Each structure stands twice: as C-alpha cells, then as structure tokens.
Image (cartoon, helix red, strand yellow):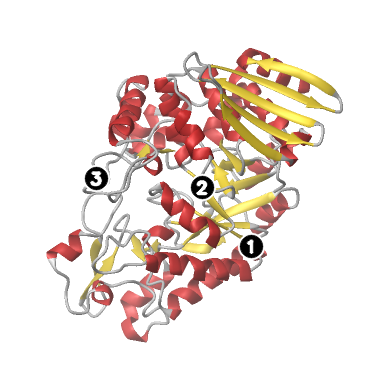
Amino acid sequence: MSSRGVDLLAYADRLGGDLAGLRALLDGPLAEFAGVHILPFFTPFDGADAGFDPVDHAAVDLRLGGWDDVRAIAERRGVTADLIVNHVSSASAEFADWLRHGADSAADGMFLTYDRVFPDGGTEEEITAFYRPRPGLPFTAYRAADGRRRLVWTTFLPSQIDLDVAHPAARAYLRRVLDALREGGVTTVRLDAVGYAVKTPGTDSFMTPATLEFVREIAAMVRAAGMRVLVEVHAHYTQQQAIAPLVDLVYDFALPALLLHSLGTGTVDRIADWLAIRPDNAVTVLDTHDGIGVVDAGPGAGRPGLLSTDEMAAVFARAAEATDGHSSVASVVPEWAAMPHQINATFLSALGGDGTAYLLCRAVQLWVPGEPQLYYVGLLGGLDDAALFERTGNGRDVNRHVYPADEIEAALQTPVTRALLELVRIRTRHAAFDGAFGYRVRGDGRLELTRTSGGAMARLTVATREPAFEIELRDASGSRVISGIDDLAAEGMTAG
C-alpha cells in the first residue's frame, strides 16, 4: 500500500456475497482503495465467532471461493488476512486427533491445558487474576477418548481452544498457516488476539513482557514468510507505543474515543495531545468488525489515560443517548471491568446519524499519519442493524450488516458515501499526502491538520462544537476550498 493509499475492511460474504463479488466491487465502484483486509474467509467463515474460530485455517471456505480468488484480488492491491494466533476451533482436525489419541497424536502439546500453566495447581488469586474479555473463567473441560477429562484454556468461547504457543507443535501449525497465506497472495498478516496468547501465572496474562517477546518471535516468522506484520491489541495506549517498534503496523484505537470526546465537549486539545505521541506506523480506524475501540484512550493498570474515567463514561453515555440506549445493551463489559472496551454501534449511529460530524471524523482519520482503513459498514453510511442483533444475540452484529447488491448500489448514491469516497480520492491522489504532516490548535478552538509536499498542500480545519469542517487543497492544477458534506459530496459526484 502506498503512503497515500486507503484500505477497505470487509467480510466477503457481507459485501459482495463471496470473494468474486468483493473483487468486482474493488475493481468497480471501490477501485480507489489501494488494499483490502478480508475478514476471515477460512473454513468455516460463519462459525460461532464469524470466522475467528477456524476448523481449517489454511483453506478458503468453498462457499466463498478459493485461493485463486484471493490471488486475483491481490493482483491489483494489497491483501491483509488474519493469523488467528490464540486459538483454533474445537472441531479442527488437530484437536479431534488429540482427543482421540492423546500423547500419540501429532498434535500433542499443541493445545494449552490447565496443568501446563499450573503444574502444581493454581490458587484462587492466580486463577481470577487472568484478564478475559468475556464473562466467566477461561477454561473448558473436554473428555478424551480414553474417558479422561482435560481442562483446556478457552479465552474467548468454549469452542475456541487456545494454542500453547511455546510448543513446537503449535509453532509448526502457525508456520503452515503462514505458508498458505503467503501462497494465497496475502501481503500483510494481522495477528489476531495475540495479546492473550501467553499465560503467565501471577499476572493478568495480557500484554505482559512475555507477550511482547512472543510478538517479536511471531513477527519474525511472518517477515521470514515475506509478509508485513500488523498487531491487533485493545489496551492502554502505552501498549501500542511499546509494540510499534516491534512490528510493521499497529492500530490507532485511541483516535475514535478522542473524536467522540471532542464532539461531545467541543474541545480538540486531547486529539492534539495524542497527535504528539501516537505511533506513525498506525493503521488508522474509527470502526471495525469488533465495534468502536474506546478502552485504549482511557486509564488502566493505575496509569492515567488520554481521557479520564469520567470522560470515558461520558463518551459511553453520549453513544447510548444517540442510539436510544441500544449501544449499552449491545456492548459487552469484560469480566471484572467497569466499562466496555468497545462500543457496539456503527460510528454513524454513535453520532446520532449526524452526517457532518461523521465526515469530520473521517476527514481527521484520513489526514493523520499512518495507513487509514475504512470498514465496509462505515463506508456505506450504515446505521445499527438491530434486527440482526436481535436474531443472533451477538452485540457486535449491530455493526456487521449483510449488504445485498441493491443496498450497496443505493448506498453508493447517498451524500455520506459519495463524500467519503471523495475523501478517499483526495487522500489517494493529492500529492500533499506524500509529504510532511503538521497540526495546530487555533485560538478559536479549531484544529488544523496540514499535509505538504513541495508546492502541494492539503489543509483540514475542524470545529467540533458546531460541528463543521473545511478543506483547502493546492497543487499544480490550482487550488480549491471544500466546506462541509454537501460540497464534498458534490465534488464526489463530479469526480464520479
């Protein structure tokens, strides 16, 4: 992906229907995107955790297509795919073989058992210290063929069996998956749930020094396979700072909460504070398939955050008000935590459907350094899919709408999506984005973000109290000023 490029984040089945359909969109109305992160398309893509519980992590689900379809997408743009580091499905061939044959299985040692972490037994204090993003303890008992019950680690769901990432059998498995991804045309690997992968008694086992060492090791494996490394961790912002030098890319999950705070308070100082210290090698997002990241901006483990606890609570409260209380129902509070670490709502819904506020946030996302990534529901201006949530009971499904072809076509004609595609076009094509980034807080409480390269300049000015934004562009072809969503959408109509 170029320094100007923008990535799309999407499920193939929910945007396009399958890999061929997704490719048609990327080669057609979404051709401006320089890359795409295809959310799990492995076998099966529609398991208990929407593909993050692979039975066969090295195989494309035949209902979506095959590796040839992935390679066809990769011919014209970068492709990111997930390496699910922490676990596999309980229905995987490896886990079934281990239950059947025990110590005689080639997979013996691949899965993390209770006694591997606590060979002498764990105390109540040690067991309850583990951080888990869902209610309950992280163990599940499975019966082996010999009748013996084995207590295995299941950090997320009982059907997601944790790997013993220190064991050679698990390392060999991860290498096999990496080989399949490389051969399939994948250029960037996202390490999913890596923060939970190493269990260390006496700690909460989330992003510990032992975890960071494993990140170094798995990153070396990915790079040795010829791909870039993106790490996904929702944690205190200092964790992103610690990981950034070890890998190619980290996420900026703090920006969404800071923007929501700014729009709620009419201030921009916290965003400016973050711009001074955030990693430049960031994938910049506002929303993802997991919701709107917010915990990264708050305090944690006795350390102050970019926002205080009260300010974080106010962000949640405003989102709940904007969604008529729906975000509070859909969002999950992790065990022993006071607040959710993600808001389950579409970003537009969290802003009460305010298109100007929404495009202001998107413009900031595309102006700051890093590699911006747009989630497919956000691109199409989606609001909460309450019906899907009601049907599945999964709060994250409010932001995982399945778009049939007619809805995609209609969304592409709306002012919000046309304006957003124009922002993508500016970011992709304007020469200023090859150069330096600068920012300042003006005396009138507005924030200016400026990109310059030679004689080219792209300046974004935002006011969060109104809200309002203005874009000034200058290059060899001349200069122009775009004020607000209607002007931006009209520019997109002309370009289209």
Q: Secondary structure at mark 1?
A: loop
Q: Secondary structure at mark 2?
A: strand
User: Residue 71, position in %: x, y?
Assistant: 70, 56
Q: Which mark is residue 227?
A: 1
Give the CA distance from mark 3 to mark 2. Answer: 22 Å
Identify which residue is drawn at 20% across, 77% down: 147
Give the mark toward the camera: 3 or 1.
3
Q: Mark 2 and mark 3 in contact (Cβ < 8 Å)?
A: no
Identify which residue is drawn at 62% across, 15% down: 484
Q: Is residue 491 left or right of residue 12?
A: right
2 or 1: tag closer to the N-terminus: 1
> Which residue carries the number 3 mark?
337
User: Residue 326, position in %: x, y?
Assistant: 32, 26
Q: Secondary structure at mark 3?
A: loop
The amino acid type found where label 2 is placed reads Tyr
Give the CA distance from mark 3 to mark 1. Answer: 36 Å
3 or 2: tag closer to the N-terminus: 2
Q: Which mark is residue 251?
A: 2
The amino acid type found where label 3 is placed reads Ala
Give the mark toward the camera: 2 or 1.
2
In the image, 260 versus 495, the foreground residue is: 260
Q: Mark 1 and mark 3 in contact (Cβ < 8 Å)?
A: no
In the image, 142 versus 361, the foreground residue is: 361
User: Callout 1: few (<14), some (14-19), or many (20+) C-alpha neighbours within 10 Å?
Assistant: many
